[in-house]
Image (tube, rainbow, N blue to C red):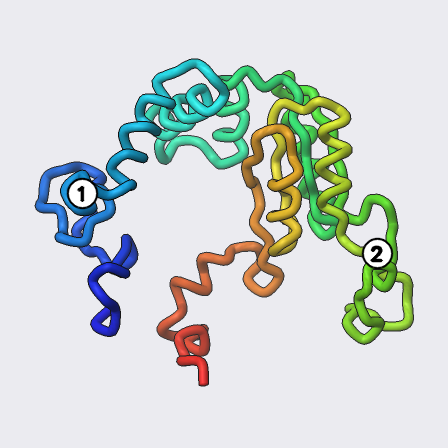
Amino acid sequence: MSKKNVANLSCTDCSVYNCKTRDREFPGFCLTTKDNGEHEIAKDIEEIKQHLKGDDQDAVIARASAQVEGLFYGKLTRVEEIMEFANRIGAKSIGIATCAGLIEEAKIFAEILEAKGFKYYSAICKVGSVDKTEIGILEEHKIRPGTHESMCNPILQARILNYHNTDLNVIVGLCVGHDSLFIKYSEAPVTTLVTKDRVTGHNPVSALYTAHSYYKRLLAEKK
């Protein structure tokens, strides 16, 4: 923090968080009050507020998200929150973009959706069965060199779910970067049920909790 120019300070440099409750003083560099209303951010705040008062998809999603948070805070699992959110935005058909390594978990999620009256359609990451070398990946960069190793195909996953006109798509453990492509090409809104982390049993925040102990290598400065 001490090395940063004031102009480059942002939310992770703050310890006040007055933006949440407005019961304290905003720090001088706060993005909410940037340059006392003369900065573009001030215009963005007002523009977005007006936009989300409307009736388009963004506004419906914003209000549904806030309702789920406020009404069910600490009461529902994420699986249940997703279904509650889906109901509130009128989503009837749920797309499941799943990692092959979490296909069993995706099957359970599909079973839950069906039990609650949702339609669903799923697409596994290896769909298309294109070998990694066909897009320029070196053989030695495979997990198991010398064998057929299908690339993950998040763009195809998105297109398949687009073809089926899903109302909401749910990510179940797509790889870092593959999730980015899926979100980019999905026509339906996207939320995440599982974030993949093979080392921590899909609990990536544990690396942050232990960054000062077991995973202190994360804080070692780059040489």
* For marks 2 and 1 on the same chain, the one whose residue lies earlier in the sequence: 1
Q: Report crowding for label 1: few under 14, some 14 to 19, many 20 or more residues within 10 A (C-alpha).
A: some
Q: In which quarter of the image is residue 206?
A: bottom left
**In front: 47, or 38?**
38
- Quadrant holding the C terminus: bottom left
Q: List x then y, in percent, for residue 78.
A: 49, 36
Q: In which quarter of the image is residue 107?
A: top right
Q: Is residue 136 above or below residue 89?
A: below
Amino acid at dot 1: Thr
Q: List x then y, in percent, for residue 8.
A: 27, 61
Q: What element carries label 1?
A: loop
Q: Report crowding for label 2: few under 14, some 14 to 19, many 20 or more residues within 10 A (C-alpha).
A: some
Asked whether, in this view, residue 178 is left or right of residue 100, the answer is left
Q: Residue 150 carries which label?
A: 2
Q: In this view, does 29 lie above or below 182?
A: below
Asked whether, in this view, residue 191 is left or right of residue 130, the answer is left
**Residue at the spot 79% in from the left edge and 56% down from the top edge:** 151
**In front: 118, or 167?**
167
Q: What element carries label 2?
A: loop
Q: List x then y, in percent, for residue 37.
A: 18, 39
Q: Which mark is residue 186?
A: none
Dot 1 corresponds to which residue? 33
**In front: 51, or 167?**
51
